[in-house]
Structures are given as C-alpha cells and as structure tokens.
C-alpha cells in the first residue's frame, strides 16, 4: 500500500490509520470511529470497482448530509472516480440534464430518492441497466461482519493528484450551469491551507449543516474535517433547534455556514438560555452577511460571525481572522496561504489601496477553464487570474472588501447602482428582515431600482423610501417596493434573484 497522501482517498486512509478509534462522525446517538468509517469506505469502493467503476468514472451522489454521503464520496475518490454531487431537491429533469452533461455512469443515493435517480440516469444515458447504488445513513459500518481488529480491505488507490475528482455546477443564475472540474491536488491544497488557518485537528468538533452537495459544506466542513482527523456532526437539514442542540450537546468548535443560518439564530428567542461557549470560529460564506446579523449574533452568543470568501472555481480565497472583528465586519480578510487576490481598474492595471475594481484570483486550488465553453472560459480566465465578476477593494494592509457583483449593477440613466448598497440601507430599518434589490427595465433602455422586502414587523413603503432618501442619492432610491413573506433561495442560501 502506498504511503503517500497525494489523493483524497489516500489522505482519508492515513487519517483513519492514525486515529482508528477516534470518532469521525457523531450521528444521532452513535459515534462512528475513523476505523469503522474507513471499513465502510473501502467496502463501497470495492463494490464500485466490481461494477466496472475505475479511473475517471463519473459517479453522481444525491444524498442529504450524513454518514452515507461521506462514505460515498471517499469510496468514489478511492476507486479513482469523479464525484458529481447532486442536490437531492432537484427534479428528475434537472438531474438528468446535469447527469448527461457530466457523463455520469453510476449513481449513489438512498431509498427515498432511488426511483427519481434511476429515472434521471436512464434519461441521461439512454439505456436501461442497473447502475444505482442504494446506501443508508444507518448502515452498519461493517456489513461483512469483519471485526475491528481485522485489516481494512483497501484496494490500491486508482488516481493521481492531477486527476479530476470533483465536478461541480454553477448555479446557472446567468445562463446554463457551467461544469467546474477540480482535481485531488486542487482540493487538498485548499483543505490543507484552510485547516491550518482555522486550527482543525482531532480535538476539534465541526458542525456540517451547509449542504454537502455545495462547495461550502462539501469542502469547508466535510472534507476539511475528514482529512484532518476532526470529528464531524452532520445535520441533514437546517433547523434552528437542531443546530442549537448539536452545538450545545457536542460542544461544537467550528461552524461554517451561510448567512441565513446565522441570521435565524441571531433572531431566535429560546425558552431557556443556550450555551454556544464552545464555538471558536463561525464563518459565513456563499453570500454577503449583513453586519447587523454578526453584531446581533455576538450580542446573543458572545461570538462574531466572520466572513469567508470563496467560489466553486477557486475554493476558499480569503478569511477574516482580524484580532478585532468588530472593526472589520465588512471585510473578508486576507487571502489564505498561497492565494493571490488583485484588484484591477477599468484599464486593466492593478488598483491602488482603497480603489474599487474587478477582483482577480490566482490560486493553486483553482480550476483553469469551463469544459466545452470557450467563450465563458476566455471571459473568466485571463492572464492566470480567475475573474468571478465581483467588484471589491483592498486596504493598505491587503484586507479585501467586497462591493458587489458587477453583473447585478443597475443602470439608472447612465448611473450605476450597486444593489448591495441599497439593501444594506433598507435592512437598517428594524422591521425589515431581508431586502433584495434588482433592476427593472424601462422602455427607454435603462432601469429602475426595485426592492423586494421581507418584513419582520410593521413597516410601510413610505417609511422605507424616506429611509433611503436620507442616506442615498436620488437615483439609488427604489421606485418600486414589494413586500413578500419569503425570498426564493438555493440550497447554499443564495437568493435566487432571477426568480424574483
């Protein structure tokens, strides 16, 4: 057996061999040790190989957060395959589209999703053969009955560090979802730097509630925990009482989620005080976190929620680890080790500190193209940098502040309006829970500012207009304000603006 750790399969194997009796997963009332989990991973990897999976085979996984997803991911990686995470809430048609684009050959899912996944794979492949593996979160780690003292039935790892191991898909908010390919090296580079920055170790306990089908939950909670020997507490869905109970009971140290998770907890009223004193780090990613939410979370639980900047294409880019977070809540901090972030002005030259411009990222963890999409590749990947379409600035110390998405800016008679700026003003009103701002096309070729507001108390259109007029230039003030009970969001917590 090789002793290197250049692939995810090997890295997990070494973590399991180093701490075989240490809890890898706390699930319901049970602790699954690294030895038990490794045995389940090895057995599933061998089943995949016996069915014909090998180097480069694409294997879709549609499962909620839990032990089954973790076994399926590392089994596929060890067998040399490429994991294609599928959001379990997708319809058969939506699944089939992604499966066809990825060239998926096998599907791993559970009993609840088996019929839908089978139909989607049949539609995508156009042939009728059994290629769906059914797994369960409560499966015994060692179905063969082999004892804990027996050698784990590893087969030789069938991948190299430069082989693809993960296909992710963009949200598709600006068109057809783009396939994002990342290698074993990409993911290990990211997780090694992230776990070093945040102090992951076997003594650390991590809550995994952001979906594992999305880059945030997959890499920053699940993978980071498993390759560092930490203990992961996965939750299949976000429910505030379950999250609070898990943090208290399991003494969680690291919580990496999305904004709405922290906003809901900050606004929650509990019948009895809850104890979040074990938390060392709370990081919000995937969408901007209102500063008020971080302050409210700190007031309630004694810890600020900091911001993490990343993307599916690059992995983790930057972390706010400032000594005094209260003075830097708007910042996503400094790039992690080995990652370069540059701000470019309109003329393509690097901007000076304090000047806004296009954000470019250069990282060994990043992909370098969108397969089959030369125009999108040429636009996003230039001069060794990836341009996600974000606008930002850096201060004199290199800390990064995100201003907004360039593609979302609103053209009001030639003036550009940043929707995030208007949203922050609206959310200052104590009765506004959420606000989303977008442009509405006019017959004159420009746009009007439109706001969709989710109230959490009594407020009127006139109050909100007055609030905006007091703090914004006239052309930034919404001319349309709508009230709704909730906003459409993705599994990652991003507001689906195109659905508004």
Image (cartoon, rainbow, N blue to C red):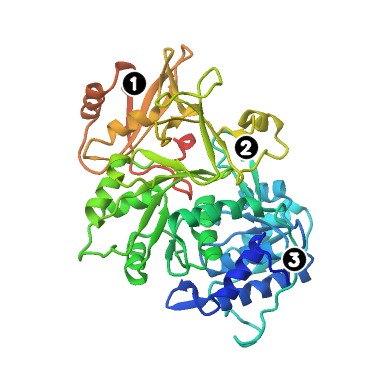
- Depth order, front residue of 232/449: 232
How many C-alpha atoms fall within 10 Å of the one at disc 1: few (<14), some, or many (≥20)? many
Disc 3 to disc 2, C-alpha distance:
29 Å
Left or right: where 480 falls relative to 212: left
The CA distance from mark 1 to mark 3 is: 57 Å
Mark 2 vs mark 1, foreground winner is: 1
Q: Secondary structure at mark 2?
A: loop
Q: Quadrant of the N terminus?
A: bottom right
Classify mark 2: residues with Cα within 10 Å, few (<14), some (14-19) or many (20+). Answer: few
Q: Secondary structure at mark 1?
A: helix
The x and y percentages for residue 172 are: 57, 39
Quarter of the image with the C terminus is top left
- Report the front residue among 442 and 171: 171
Q: Quadrant of residue 135?
A: bottom right
The mark nearer the N terminus, 3 or 2, is 3
Mark identifier at residue 156 = none
Label 3 SS: loop
Q: Circle 3 sits on which residue?
A: 130
Tell me the residue that label 1 is attached to.
476
Left or right of 36, for residue 473: left
The residue that label 2 is drawn on is 176
x then y, percent, for residue 209: 44, 59
Taking the spot 46% from the left edge, 73% from the top edge, the residue there is 27
């Amino acid at each position: 057996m090789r002793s290197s750790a250049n692939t995810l399969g090997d890295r997990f194997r070494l973590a399991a061999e180093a701490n075989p009796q240490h809890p890898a997963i706390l699930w319901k009332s049970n602790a699954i040790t690294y030895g038990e989990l490794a045995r389940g991973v090895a057995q599933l990897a061998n089943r995949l190989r016996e069915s014909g999976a090998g180097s480069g085979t694409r294997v879709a996984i549609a499962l909620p957060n839990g032990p089954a997803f973790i076994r399926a991911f590392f089994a596929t990686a060890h067998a040399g395959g490429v994991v294609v995470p599928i959001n379990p809430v997708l319809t058969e048609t939506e699944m089939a589209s992604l499966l066809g684009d990825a060239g998926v050959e096998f599907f791993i899912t559970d009993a609840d999703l088996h019929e839908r996944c089978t139909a989607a794979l049949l539609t995508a492949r156009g042939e009728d053969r059994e290629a769906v593996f059914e797994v369960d979160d409560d499966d015994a780690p060692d179905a063969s009955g082999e004892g804990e003292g027996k050698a784990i039935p590893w087969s030789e790892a069938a991948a190299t560090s430069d082989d693809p191991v993960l296909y992710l898909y963009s949200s598709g908010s600006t068109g057809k979802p783009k396939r994002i390919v990342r290698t074993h090296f990409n993911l290990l580079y990211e997780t090694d730097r992230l776990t070093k920055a945040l102090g992951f170790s076997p003594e650390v306990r991590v809550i995994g509630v952001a979906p594992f089908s999305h880059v945030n939950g997959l890499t920053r909670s699940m993978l980071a925990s498993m390759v560092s020997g930490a203990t992961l507490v996965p939750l299949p869905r976000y429910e505030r009482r379950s999250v609070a109970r898990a943090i208290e009971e399991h003494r969680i140290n690291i919580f990496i989620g999305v904004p709405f998770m922290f906003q809901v907890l900050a606004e929650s009223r509990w019948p009895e005080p809850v104890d979040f004193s074990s938390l060392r780090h709370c990081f919000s990613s995937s969408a901007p976190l209102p500063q008020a939410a971080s302050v409210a979370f700190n007031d309630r639980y004694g810890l600020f929620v900091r911001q993490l900047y990343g993307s599916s294409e690059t992995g983790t880019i930057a972390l706010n680890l400032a000594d005094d977070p209260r003075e830097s809540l708007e910042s996503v901090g400094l790039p992690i080790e080995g990652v370069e972030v540059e701000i470019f002005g309109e003329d393509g030259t690097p901007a000076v500190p304090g000047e806004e411009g296009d954000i470019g990222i250069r990282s060994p963890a990043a992909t370098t193209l969108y397969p089959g999409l030369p125009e999108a590749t040429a636009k996003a990947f230039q001069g060794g940098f990836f341009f996600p379409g974000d606008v930002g600035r850096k201060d004199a110390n290199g800390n990064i502040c995100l201003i907004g998405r360039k593609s979302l800016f609103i053209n009001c008679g030639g003036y550009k309006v940043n929707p995030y700026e208007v949203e922050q003003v609206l959310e200052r009103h104590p009765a506004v829970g959420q606000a989303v701002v977008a442009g509405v096309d006019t017959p004159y070729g420009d746009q009007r500012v439109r706001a969709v507001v989710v109230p959490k108390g009594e407020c009127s259109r006139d109050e909100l207009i007055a609030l905006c007029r007091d703090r914004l230039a006239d052309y930034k003030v919404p001319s349309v304000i709508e009230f709704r009970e909730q906003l459409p969001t993705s599994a990652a917590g991003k507001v689906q603006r195109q659905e508004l």
